[in-house]
Amino acid sequence: MTTIKDIGRLANVSIAAVSKVVNGDYSSVSEATKERILKISKELNYKPNRMARGLVTSKTNILGLMVSDITNPFFAALAKGVEDRAGTYGYNVLLCNTDEKSEKEITYVDLMLQYNAAGVIVTSSSNPESEHILELAEHNTPFVSIDRSISSNNYSIFVDNFRGTYVAAEHLIKNGHTKLAFIGGEPPGTGINQRLNGYLQALRDYKIEENCQLVCIDSYHSESGYRNVNMLLNKGLSFTGVVCGNDLIAFGVIKALKERGLKIPEDISIIGFDDIYLSALFDPSLTTIRQPIYEMGSHAVDVLIRLIKGENVIEKVKYFGPELVERDSVANISHKKLQTG
Amino acid sequence: MTTIKDIGRLANVSIAAVSKVVNGDYSSVSEATKERILKISKELNYKPNRMARGLVTSKTNILGLMVSDITNPFFAALAKGVEDRAGTYGYNVLLCNTDEKSEKEITYVDLMLQYNAAGVIVTSSSNPESEHILELAEHNTPFVSIDRSISSNNYSIFVDNFRGTYVAAEHLIKNGHTKLAFIGGEPPGTGINQRLNGYLQALRDYKIEENCQLVCIDSYHSESGYRNVNMLLNKGLSFTGVVCGNDLIAFGVIKALKERGLKIPEDISIIGFDDIYLSALFDPSLTTIRQPIYEMGSHAVDVLIRLIKGENVIEKVKYFGPELVERDSVANISHKKLQTG
DNA sequence: TTGTAGGCGTTATCAC
DNA sequence: GTGATAACGCCTACAA
């Protein structure tokens, strides 16, 4: 490990000069010494020790990104958006997979604190408790949350979840569906509640009687969709459409329905949420509510950097618009209804 | 930020005593002072500054994990295996997504070096050049590679890729297929070559004439499968089965075939590689070659920890056995052949 | 333009 | 048992 001391010795200059030059500050060194230092540091393949640097500056250029399930392509896409944007600012991102365990989340918050992360981005978690996230604030480490409310006054980014499922349910209704199931994940802050609420509101607005039995709250994995739709069917409940909490759930639902010989969308229409890249590959390709996740990740970084720099951030909470992506998992059954009605 | 100095002052002891106690070494402190220190450090919510610690010990408990595409559930599963295992050793993992760009890989290697990672795990990359990885070795940071050969003598873990595609092709052949296409990703070290070779060897062993036109090497994304199978079909080439470089490619292939009205597996049989969790959800569920990725990740950590501790590692290269997972994307057409033949 | 020196929070050595 | 104190590598006044 070569240090500025080594370079200084070989270049016959003080470590102060070396420090300046390797940090790109040439303001008070002669051209000659600058060249000498640069040359030698390259020859020795000098790499600054960030531990030492971090010790004195008490800041690093690390951004933490905490996701609850890296296995979900949704979060992978988010990670990409965050990484790309962070790169443009010269920051590196440290991806932390909490696996939906709040103990892991606590560990990672500690880690971020102990390694002096410049800032952190936290995403939704199945665990509604978030006090430990506030530790970041206590230690003056700025953070922004995505699709998760931590406290009443932190910086956060949401997709309009309410509107998303409202549009989803509405889309089904406009296609003639009146018996709609809802299968969602566990409540992560206000996130899933809003999704549930959007669905419920759509039912109300269109004067459709709501049936509590058709509402399932479980987890955000495909197994949840698989399990719950089977449960609904086993109970003998009837429905022609299901609004899913995310695309993975939708995949599970589709799997279960196919196994039972049901056809999608002819027999049952499905609508997802997120629009992960696999949704277009599925058969049928999934009609879903797109979250502009890449953009949300980018924006989170923008906000975080401003916070780090102590600059002003105007919007404390920013909502992104969800967007209906029509593909092949929803059928129009208005015609059918007229026949039978 | 409370430091050991603060605690020392409040507890009326030296920082040396505090340092010992907070590190769990009670060997040379009285019960009384120990209690006092513990109590105060808890009250002040003391967190050791790892920068400072890392500075003096010149080691951290960070393990780097470099993956080429976090969007691929295969790597997400690997990350899980690595994280879980690292946790049992008290190490934290820093997930680096290189996005298949060697510039990013270089950046991350630097980062690992600069932050004194205890060790790093590198995985396959589309980029065959790997000299920059050797920088880790130059700086005495141990590393182990998964499915990628860096140098002739680094510690590495492979799945037997050759055997994997051999078995895949053999499976198709045993089901009566004689015209087999191969669609793989770009050559990541020996990885893809081995996969291609396994396929070729199976053809030879079963006396099936190989047709270069049926071999496509592109990338590991679903688009690659989609694009290449369409190309083969557009060329008017005939084949009844395709061996895919990974499951994502297989998904793309399936998508393309369905769009053309072809039935799977009736018209064309598909076999993947990896067995990501989505393969079971697909329609048809994908017959594939399973890599025990979680176990491979675990093992990589085991090896890495031994290297970090300077312990002896017997197997420099470890091969894991791939496993055929039969599902619904392969049809037996022997019967058909007999009829027509 | 250049160099000296103090200090960041820890660990670890060595007296007491 | 306890406590000074010297590193670790770097940044940054402040002097020269």
Image (cartoon, coloured by chain):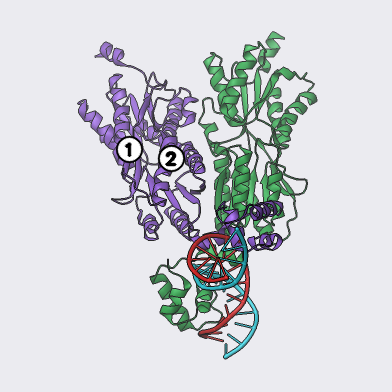
Chain colours: A green, B purple, C red, D cyan
- Which residue bears the numbered disc 2? B297
Q: Nearer the viewer, residue A206 or B149?
A: B149
Give me the chain letter of mark 1: B
Q: Nearer the viewer, residue B74 or B248?
A: B74
Residue occupying image coordinates x 65% and y 38% = A125
Instruction: Give the SS element for disc 2.
Output: helix
Quadrant showing the N terminus of chain B: bottom right
- The amino acid type, in three-letter code, at marker 2 is Gly
Using a 10 Å C-alpha cutoff, classify the residue at mark 2 as few (fewer than 14 neighbours), some (14 to 19) or many (20 or more).
Answer: many
From the top left corner, tell me how far across and down residue A41 is, in percent: 43, 72
- Which residue bears the numbered disc 1? B319
Res A90 visible: no
Residue that lies at the very extreme toward the top in this rendered image: A340
Res A273 visible: yes
Quadrant showing the C terminus of chain B: top left
Image disc number at residue B18: none
Instruction: Give the SS element for disc 1.
Output: strand
Using a 10 Å C-alpha cutoff, classify the residue at mark 1 as few (fewer than 14 neighbours), some (14 to 19) or many (20 or more).
Answer: some
Give me the chain letter of mark 2: B
Q: Quadrant of residue A62?
A: bottom right
Residue occupying image coordinates x 49% and y 44% = B89
- The amino acid type, in three-letter code, at marker 1 is Tyr
